[in-house]
């Protein structure tokens, strides 16, 4: 209950603006100010969602699988590469420019190549998702590891701590905020990547459904897919934000316990 109150307190201006926009949108379509085949009314989109709920649920599940699988692969690969670049400068000099260059190539130009390699299987969509989600994770994690408090590092080294101990006690914890920033961005980008892959070669998924509805000039169907894609992105972002919150809460509780134990031993 308190969470709901806090949510409305923090976002009441956004909710009010969204409500006004929806009412204005509905009025413009209902009064024929805007043709419904160009911009369908919100109520028409809701009707389309309800009438096609079973079909849309199947396509949503397909997109979710592609997005979450690509996100997980990107997270593991991105963090591993960031740590490797942090520990070994030769790896950083060799790989980091390639990571940057990979983002200058339009994803839509690479998607047909993935279809050529993997066919219309789930892996062509996962490959696009990994390519999009990988960049924010590796860059944010690497930058977070490099921006640490030098005084803490010098203190531990003066006490004889090894490099791995310094990494575990100082550099890794201080990199967590940057890491989770990249994770939250990647969670949203993973939905974008899965959708792009589906648009260019798929037999299921919300991107495929949107393209099919666009081909048949079904505006309500297109906007239904857009709504569900937005909802999916918000849910994945929320899950990442919740994981971040729980991680820092656990970290704070653990530090409190350690401080209590140290006080008892004194």
Image: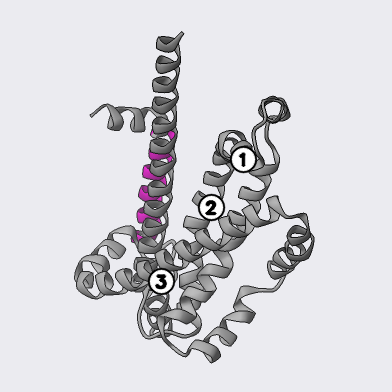
Residue 230 coordinates in the image, percent (x, y): 41, 58
Q: Which mark is residue 187?
A: none
Residue drawn at x 40%, y 54% is 236
Proximity of marks 1 and 3: CB atoms separated by less than 8 Å: no
Residue drawn at x 67%, y 30% is 160
Q: Specify which label sits upstream in the sequence, 1 or 3.
A: 3
The segment highlighted magenta reads 12-30
Asked if the magenta segment contains residue 22, the reply would be yes
Q: Which residue is mark 2?
A: 185
Question: CA gap, disc 2 to disc 3?
Answer: 17 Å
Q: Specify which label sits upstream in the sequence, 2 or 3.
A: 3
Question: CA gap, disc 1 to disc 3?
Answer: 33 Å
Say left or right for 217 vs 75. left
Residue drawn at x 69%, y 70% is 102
Residue 63: quarter of image: bottom left
Is 65 in front, or is 223?
65
Q: Which residue is mark 1?
A: 167
């Amino acid at each position: 209950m308190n969470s709901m109150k806090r949510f409305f307190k923090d976002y009441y201006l956004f909710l009010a603006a969204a409500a006004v926009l929806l009412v204005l949108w509905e009025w413009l379509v209902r009064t024929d100010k805007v043709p419904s085949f160009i911009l369908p009314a919100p109520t028409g989109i809701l009707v389309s969602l309800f009438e096609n709920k079973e079909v849309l649920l199947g396509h949503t599940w397909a997109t979710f699988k592609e997005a979450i699988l690509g996100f997980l692969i990107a997270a593991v690969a991105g963090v591993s590469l960031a740590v490797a670049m942090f520990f070994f400068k030769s790896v950083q000099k060799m790989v980091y420019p390639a990571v940057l260059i990979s983002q200058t190539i339009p994803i839509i130009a690479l998607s047909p190549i993935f279809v050529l390699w993997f066919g219309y299987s789930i892996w062509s969509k996962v490959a696009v998702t990994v390519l999009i989600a990988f960049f924010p994770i590796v860059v944010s994690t690497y930058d977070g590891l490099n921006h640490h408090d030098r005084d803490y590092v010098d203190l531990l080294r003066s006490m004889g701590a090894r490099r791995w101990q310094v990494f575990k006690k100082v550099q890794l914890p201080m990199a967590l905020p940057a890491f989770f920033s990249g994770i939250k961005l990647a969670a949203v980008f993973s939905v974008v990547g899965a959708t792009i892959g589906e648009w260019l070669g798929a037999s299921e998924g919300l991107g495929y459904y949107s393209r099919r509805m666009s081909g048949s000039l079904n505006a309500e169907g297109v906007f239904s897919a857009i709504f569900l894609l937005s909802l999916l992105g918000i849910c994945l972002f929320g899950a990442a934000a919740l994981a971040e919150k729980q991680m820092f809460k656990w970290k704070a509780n653990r530090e409190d316990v350690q401080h209590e134990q140290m006080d008892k031993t004194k």
